[in-house]
Every structure is written in structure tokens, then in C-alpha cells.
Amino acid sequence: MRSRTPVFLLDESASTTIELAIWTPLIAGTLMLVLDFSFMMTLNANMWNASRSAARAVSIHDLNATEAEAWARDELLVSNRPYEIDVTRGETDVVVTIRLAGDKAGLTPFLARVYKGDISASVRMLREPI
């Protein structure tokens, strides 16, 4: 007895092409998220380094607060991002805070859809005696 299934339903010659068309956007999106997240972590590590070096320069009396802000901005890896830099010099300590909006931290717009918040680095150092 002959099967009643149409011949085009039995043909599997294009199944690989269809699977590729289904999986490619998912794989590409995952790759973009991984790239964005790793770039965000690189920016965050660079923000920590810049805030630490600026706080150290102010704590040993090499720079004032205005110069330290310019110093920190020069130390940052990617300078075209809207960083918020705050240098506070107290009687006994120095606090340098660098903040960046999370949606401005990615390479592609994928991260802005997933990550809502800021990344920041804040370093507090005691001032050296004069």
C-alpha cells in the first residue's frame, strides 16, 4: 500500500538551510551580548585604574582636584563616552568616583536592552602628610 504523505514532505534536502536560518540570529545575538559585556568589563577595569591613579596623585599632593579630573579623563581607555568624574578632597582623604551609564558602555545596542544601570568605580585614599 502506498503512503499518502506528499512527496515534498518526505524530502529533507533543504533542512540544513532552514536550521541555519533559524539558528543564525540566536548565535549572532549571543555573540553580540558577549562582546558588549566583555567590553563593559574592560571599561569598568579601566575606570578603576584611572580613579586609583588620580586618587594617588591627589593624595601625594601632586595634583589638585581639577587637575585630577583631567588626569583621570586622559587615563580612560575610550574617551568619547559621557563619563561623570567627581574628585572630592577632604582634610584626611581623597575620593575619586568615575561613573558611566550602562547603556553607553556597549559596542552595540544589544547591551542597552539587557543592562539597566550604571557602572562606576570609586576609590578613597588617605592623604599623605605634608
Image: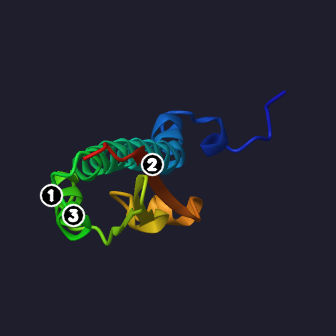
Q: Earlier in the sequence, mark 2 or mark 3?
A: 3
Q: CA distance from mark 1 to mark 2?
A: 20 Å
Q: Secondary structure at mark 2?
A: strand
At label 1, which amino acid type do we have?
Asp
- Outermost residue on the front side: it is 130
**Residue at image point 31% right, 50% down:** 55
- Outermost residue on the top side: it is 1
At label 3, which amino acid type do we have?
Asn
Residue in front for this viewpoint, 115 or 45: 45
Q: Is residue 1 above or below residue 26?
A: above
Q: Is residue 79 above or below residue 4?
A: below
| Residue picked out by circle 3 | 64
| Residue picked out by circle 1 | 74
Residue 85, disc: none
Q: Earlier in the sequence, mark 3 or mark 1?
A: 3
Q: CA distance from mark 3 to mark 1?
A: 15 Å
At label 2, which amino acid type do we have?
Arg
**Residue at image point 63% right, 41% down:** 7
Which numbered mark, 3 or 1, is in the foreground of this view? 3
| Residue picked out by circle 2 | 124
Residue in front for this viewpoint, 129 or 125: 129
Q: Can you give x and y, in whole percent of width and height, for residue 13 in the image?
A: 49, 34
